[in-house]
């Protein structure tokens, strides 16, 4: 499947800040690198996403008086989790994991670069209106099937996969190449939503 011209491997946010020792470390985050590199070696089309925030990003708890990381707040577009400062544009933590074969990427989609809007999904920012351009890029290249993996299962991977279904793609996520944050049951919630909406959850790597 990964060798097919109409299929793309989408690698979500495999960045230093989401790996152990990083600012928003996901447990086992670096375990995804080896299986993802294996799939990169087989894939005809490879796209990476990169979480990419200005230092004054509204999703950072540090920007809100009396708030702590992982608290909730209301944004004009709805509820938003407040995060520790992470993936700041140009910082070491925003770089891809050094062992990820990032040079194989044909394009890199950066997201979350507007100070006032967070962006979990690779397609739409959290206002669910502002586009990243990924849908146009994929449609222009006649890519209709997506294999997704990376960090974090229950935030950027799930939001990307669910938006991809809404945009008309056939979508699989590769669970052994994903790791979750799991905040207040978010992993269970997102797995259920993905299944209900038609995302295929794979327990093994994709050939
Ligand atoms: C992510 C929280 C904040 C992710 C990005 O990549 O899942 N999560 N920014
Ligand atoms: Zn972020």
Image: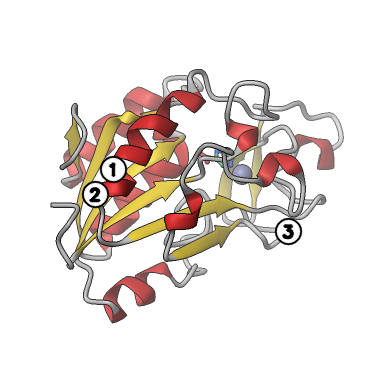
Q: Position of residue 97 (x, y in %)?
A: 57, 38
The residue wearing badge 3 is: 115
Tell which residue pokes out farthest to the right in this image. 65
Q: Secondary structure at mark 3?
A: loop
Q: Is residue 48 left or right of residue 200?
A: right
Determine whether 119 is above or below 185 in the image. below
- Mark 3–mark 1 distance (CA, rounded to whole Å): 33 Å
Determine whether 62 is above or below 27 in the image. below
Q: Earlier in the sequence, mark 3 or mark 1?
A: 1
Q: Position of residue 136 (x, y in %)?
A: 37, 77
Marks 3/1 in contact by CB < 8 Å: the verdict is no
Whether disc 1's CB lies below 8 Å from ligand 1 is answered no
Residue 39, label in figure: 1
Q: Nearer the viewer, residue 147 or 81?
A: 147
The residue wearing badge 2 is: 42
Comparing labels 3 and 1, the label whose residue is closer to the camera: 1
Q: Is residue 5 left or right of residue 50?
A: left
Q: Earlier in the sequence, mark 3 or mark 2?
A: 2
Marks 2/1 in contact by CB < 8 Å: the verdict is yes
Comparing labels 3 and 2, the label whose residue is closer to the camera: 2
Marks 3/2 in contact by CB < 8 Å: the verdict is no
Q: Is residue 103 left or right of residue 196?
A: right
Q: Secondary structure at mark 2?
A: helix
Residue 22, label in figure: none
One can see residue 181 in this view? no
Q: Position of residue 86 (x, y in %)?
A: 70, 39
């Amino acid at each position: 499947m990964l060798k097919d011209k109409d299929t793309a491997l989408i690698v979500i946010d495999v960045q230093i800040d989401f790996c152990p020792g990083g600012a928003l470390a996901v447990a086992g985050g670096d375990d995804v690198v080896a299986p993802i590199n294996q799939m990169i070696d087989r894939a005809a089309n490879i796209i990476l996403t990169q979480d990419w925030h200005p230092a004054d990003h509204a999703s950072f708890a540090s920007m809100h008086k009396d708030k702590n990381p992982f608290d909730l707040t209301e944004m004009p577009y709805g509820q938003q989790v407040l995060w520790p400062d992470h993936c700041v544009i140009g910082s070491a933590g925003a770089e891809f994991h050094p062992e990820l074969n990032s040079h194989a990427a044909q394009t890199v989609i950066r997201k979350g670069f507007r100070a006032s809007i967070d962006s979990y999904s690779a397609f739409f920012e959290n206002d669910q209106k502002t586009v990243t351009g990924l849908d146009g890029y994929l449609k222009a290249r006649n890519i209709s099937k997506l294999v997704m993996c990376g960090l974090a299962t229950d935030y950027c991977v799930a939001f990307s996969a669910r938006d991809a279904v809404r945009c008309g793609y056939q979508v699989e996520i590769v669970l052994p190449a994903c790791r979750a944050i799991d905040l207040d049951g978010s992993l269970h919630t997102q797995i259920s939503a993905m299944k209900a909406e038609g995302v295929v959850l794979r327990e093994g790597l994709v050939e």
